């Protein structure tokens, strides 16, 4: 009998969709695999939907990965053959509850010496968040051996509008009647069925070693090569802003710094990002070798 532990946090409902899909597929499978589900629960729940100030307030903690207090997971000291870590991306970082769990003593208790497969739900970019997660998993004595990404399949602007609408209203409907609905689509959730099939077969054969190679062959995530260098630069800029905001010594100073960041963010979205994407596309033919190496590292979780 094989055991898979599923650790997850869902704030808005997209990650919960993945969990429900896993449970749905589990009922169709052979009885030689048992799934155990462990939700990560902050002591003080994160609200949803959010006010704009709450949405922006998540920024420094996400980037700096400042841990929040969590309720203990009742895992009964079980040993697992595999851990599925399902998480969402906040500001190019793992969500605060997930990064908090990975920094906790319980992470080592549950994950140590057990291979980990990550499932990411995100709007667009995810490589920097996965780097953080992979490093944290290594720090607790394990290794990420596979990664599936359930990413919005629309362009960056559509996804941005949809995500903001979803987080600020909590309504799963088309923003302004023209943008896509925010929750995951059947096509994206179908990747979970493929992943579970791969895991069942490989666990049965005791052959998890080349898992990520098969995940790549099955095309279980989206990755825009030309965005890879941009994402790295954005994360560095976000880190500077996060340190700047977090170092403020008074509520008034922090409020002013948040306002400056919000103004910068609007300017970046409207002016800088479109220019950066255009420049990246123009330079792409001359940077293919470098980007190909970066892509291969991202695909293999390095």
Image (cartoon, rainbow, N blue to C red):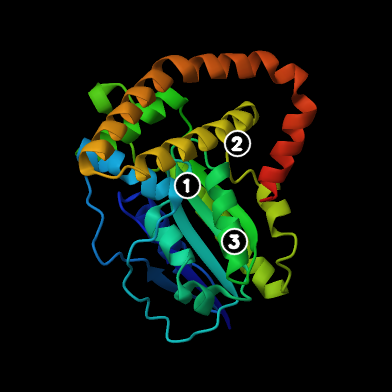
| Alpha carbon distance from label 3 to label 2 | 22 Å
Q: Label 1: which residue?
A: 93
Q: Residue at x 48, y 32 (%)?
A: 153
Is residue 89 visible in the rendered image? The answer is: no
Indicate the secondary structure of the residue bearing disc 3. Answer: helix
Q: Label 3: which residue?
A: 197
Q: Residue at x 35, y 40 (%)?
A: 245
- Judging depth in this view, the residue of 243 and 68 nearest the camera is 243
Q: Is 58 left, or right, of 102 in this rendering?
A: left
Q: Label 2: which residue?
A: 223
Indicate the secondary structure of the residue bearing disc 2. Answer: loop
Q: Circle 1: is it few (<14), some (14-19), or many (20+) Cα within 10 Å?
A: many
Q: Residue furthest right?
A: 289
Q: Is 286 left, or right, of 112 in this rendering?
A: right
Against 70, residue 184 (above or below) is: above
State the image coordinates of residue 279 (x, y, percent, origin top left).
61, 14
């Amino acid at each position: 009998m094989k055991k898979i532990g599923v650790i997850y946090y869902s704030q808005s409902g997209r990650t919960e969709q993945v969990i429900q899909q896993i449970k749905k597929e589990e009922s169709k499978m052979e009885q030689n695999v048992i799934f155990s589900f462990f939700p990560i629960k902050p002591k003080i729940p994160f609200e949803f939907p959010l006010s704009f100030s709450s949405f922006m307030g998540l920024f420094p903690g996400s980037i700096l990965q400042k841990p929040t207090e969590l309720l203990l997971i009742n895992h009964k000291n079980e040993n697992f053959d595999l851990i599925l870590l399902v998480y969402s991306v906040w500001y190019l970082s793992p969500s605060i509850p997930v990064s908090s769990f990975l920094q906790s003593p319980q992470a080592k208790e549950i994950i140590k010496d057990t291979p980990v497969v990550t499932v990411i739900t995100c709007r667009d970019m995810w490589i920097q968040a996965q780097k953080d997660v992979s490093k944290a998993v290594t720090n607790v004595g394990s290794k990420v051996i596979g990664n599936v990404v359930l990413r919005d399949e629309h362009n960056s602007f559509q996804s941005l509008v949809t995500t903001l609408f979803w987080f600020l209203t909590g309504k799963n409907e088309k923003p302004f009647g023209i943008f896509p609905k925010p929750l995951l689509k059947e096509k994206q959730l179908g990747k979970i069925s493929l992943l579970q099939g791969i895991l069942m077969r490989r666990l049965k054969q005791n052959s998890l070693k080349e898992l990520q190679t098969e995940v790549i062959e099955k095309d279980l995530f989206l990755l825009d090569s030309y965005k890879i260098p941009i994402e790295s630069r954005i994360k560095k800029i976000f880190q500077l802003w996060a340190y700047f905001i977090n170092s403020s010594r008074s509520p008034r100073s922090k409020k002013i710094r948040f306002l400056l960041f919000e103004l910068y963010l609007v300017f970046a979205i409207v002016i800088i990002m479109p220019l950066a994407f255009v420049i990246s596309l123009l330079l792409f033919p001359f940077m293919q070798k470098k980007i190909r190496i970066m892509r291969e590292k991202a695909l293999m979780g390095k």
